[in-house]
Image (cartoon, coloured by chain):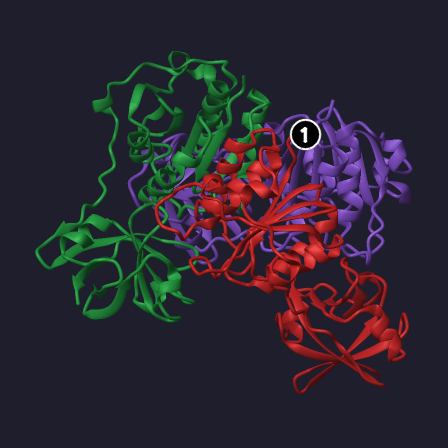
Chain colours: A red, B purple, C green
Amino acid sequence: MAQPVSFLSDFGTQDEFVGVVHGVIYRLSPASRVIDITHGITPGDIRGGALALTRAIQYLPPGVVLAIVDPGVGTPRKALALETAAGFFVGPDNGLLSPAVAMVGGAVAIHAIENREVMIEGPGNTFAGRDVFAPAAGLLAAGEATLADLGPELDPGQVLPLMLPLPKVEESAIHGEVLWVDWYGNVQTNIGPEDLAAIGVGPGESVEVRVGASAHEGRFVTTFGDVAVGELAIHVDSAGLIGIAVRGGRADEEISLASGRPLSFRRS
Amino acid sequence: MAQPVSFLSDFGTQDEFVGVVHGVIYRLSPASRVIDITHGITPGDIRGGALALTRAIQYLPPGVVLAIVDPGVGTPRKALALETAAGFFVGPDNGLLSPAVAMVGGAVAIHAIENREVMIEGPGNTFAGRDVFAPAAGLLAAGEATLADLGPELDPGQVLPLMLPLPKVEESAIHGEVLWVDWYGNVQTNIGPEDLAAIGVGPGESVEVRVGASAHEGRFVTTFGDVAVGELAIHVDSAGLIGIAVRGGRADEEISLASGRPLSFRRS
Amino acid sequence: MAQPVSFLSDFGTQDEFVGVVHGVIYRLSPASRVIDITHGITPGDIRGGALALTRAIQYLPPGVVLAIVDPGVGTPRKALALETAAGFFVGPDNGLLSPAVAMVGGAVAIHAIENREVMIEGPGNTFAGRDVFAPAAGLLAAGEATLADLGPELDPGQVLPLMLPLPKVEESAIHGEVLWVDWYGNVQTNIGPEDLAAIGVGPGESVEVRVGASAHEGRFVTTFGDVAVGELAIHVDSAGLIGIAVRGGRADEEISLASGRPLSFRRS
């Protein structure tokens, strides 16, 4: 039975790239549904793509995950196809797949996509999404190929991991960074609720957020509705990490945060 | 038999929100097609979302409408599931669904989505699209739940309506406002062709459009092709309301119009 | 059996236009999958839409192609439905379909969509995508209509071609122009690899790119990885044309290129 394909990329929506990949998959596996996770990853932002995929993965149907953020296209970076307990993953060997694969329990097999017979022979070699990744995803989804048909098995140690920054918890402060600013201006940090607990901040209590030379007062609440309009709501976000929101506003603008920016929390 | 889900939101296309909702629906109702009406509603713009849904509704297949523009997420606003002659509607209780539901003849039953067993228990409570609305839509589409399974019935009077501005027709002028500026810069007003007739403007005749302190000459025509390039075409738009277009240009820029801006028409 | 519909437009993703067209197609042909090629064509950019469709066409499944970039909506331009060896094409008669139809071997029959019974009778006549093109595509995809059901046959000579600029090859220089700048800032020219060969530029050799008064040094390489970060990679792109990329950067910004801009290549 044909499996669904969940597809994430930095292709944007301006060009025909996404449609062409859909076309290639349809031709190989017409009964597979394709779910577009997002194609709005910042061009070349491997970490941003990996984090989005990791946040989404447990809500996607078992099947094939096709993820393409591939600034190294046209260099010797490998093309990967992995099998996990949650299905297949297809994408470049640059760390993009690693956190999501880890989240579903790791790979049981990893192959490089190298066999020319499973690729589309297109002009140029700049559109690996179309010529290499989509055919592999389509064949796996259709049950028309095994990993071994795509290319040689790799050792897990040969695959690039993705280093994600860990917060540093001191006695009275946590130093972390911004992982993600969403469409609404809500901010996700790399800090967990257990870190806040470790510095003694409990539900309903005040927290100081330091960004650069500025300090901002927030409250650790359960829902946005627990703070007044315009106030900082420090909360557990939809991925289980500490988020920063401004009720009725944009936290990224109010306190100058962007992906990768360091920040710290302190009791106040 | 699985029903299609028509899905509108202000989620944008940058993050994985839309894909996650598709994933949740797929897992509950794999045979349901999901039609993305649009996810480009301005964040938090309930009126803009309600109007887009109302313009689209009669062209969508019967099934489930899932609409999420939810600035009140995390506050005690209710989550609704309604049944109408045209199918089910799922979304927040903030007026977003009201005009479209009215257009298809009103609700025959209204329930609040409150039963925890039909929700996804995710971290945080900021992504009701994933945890509350998508599961309800998926279960209804699959025929796996009734409204009563989702939560208690509500009285129609408990549901928030949406107030849409009515034009004021005087003897020689109509005072209205802009409802929508589309991607091409075409403008939709809240004024109907019967209002133009009431001030004596007939097909082919000139109309004056006043915006702030400026007056602009237009002609009430059947098609864009009836005016010269650069001229204002006052016309009945694709939703049956009076629209303003500039042939070969953008009406919003030419005469400074934006959603919510007041304007008036006069015979000239 | 229902055929898939591949859909390209300049509708953007902000409004409900794309969703409404999906709805109309679903109602007429519920078993047809709809592949969105892209809806990000610059509003009214017929050439841009035609080129995107041409680059995509060979990767799409046989079925119905629905393409709408229609600045002449509301003028007497015809609505077309064509049959080719690769399936049906539906769209406005403004050149949009012509290069893609030529690429699949030309039309075996061309009809104008004129019969009112196959159209949706909506208010206004500004949304031909909904009222004229989508119903035609849906009926053809469902096998519920033949071309003759849509309207009268046309002579190929009655259909608008699209003039694409040809490069001018001199003894030591090629004069061409930019066809497309993609999401990543990579540039596609209207120049082919055989043109570079004609002026004596072989693989691995240097090329001078002149844009306006500026000259830039590049190298004609097989893959992006063959140049250093920041260098110009002149390469055969994914459509078989000469492309210009900057490894790790945006060629459009580095050397001031945009769609339609003239440039020339010289041996250096």
Q: Quadrant of residue B235?
A: top left
Q: Quick check: C79 left or right of C164?
A: right
- In the picture, the quarter occupied by the C terminus of chain B is top left
Q: How far across and down, in percent of the image, does residue A240 sit?
A: 79, 61
Image mark 1: chain: B
Q: Is residue A167 visible?
A: yes
Mark 1: secondary structure: loop
Q: Nearer the viewer, residue C179 or B230?
A: C179
Q: Nearer the viewer, residue C173 or C102?
A: C173
Q: Is residue B240 visible?
A: no
Q: Quick check: C265 left or right of C61?
A: left
Q: Quick check: A176 left or right of B76?
A: left
Give the vertical position of C55 relative to C22 (above or below): below
Q: Quadrant of residue B67?
A: top right
Residue appearing at x 63%, y 76% in the figure: A261
Give the vertical position of C215 relative to B221 (above or below): below
Q: Amino acid at mark 1?
A: Pro
Residue appearing at x 60%, y 33% in the figure: A142
Residue appearing at x 84%, y 74% in the figure: A196
Q: How far across and down, in percent of the image, does residue B170 sit?
A: 54, 41
Count of all numbered marks drawn on residues in the image? 1
Give the vertical position of C148 relative to C89 (above or below): above
Please identify the residue farthest to the bottom as the structure is shown. Answer: A213
Please identify the residue farthest to the left as the structure is shown. Answer: C171
Q: How far across and down, in percent of the image, does residue C142 sit?
A: 52, 18
* Residue identifier under label 1: B4
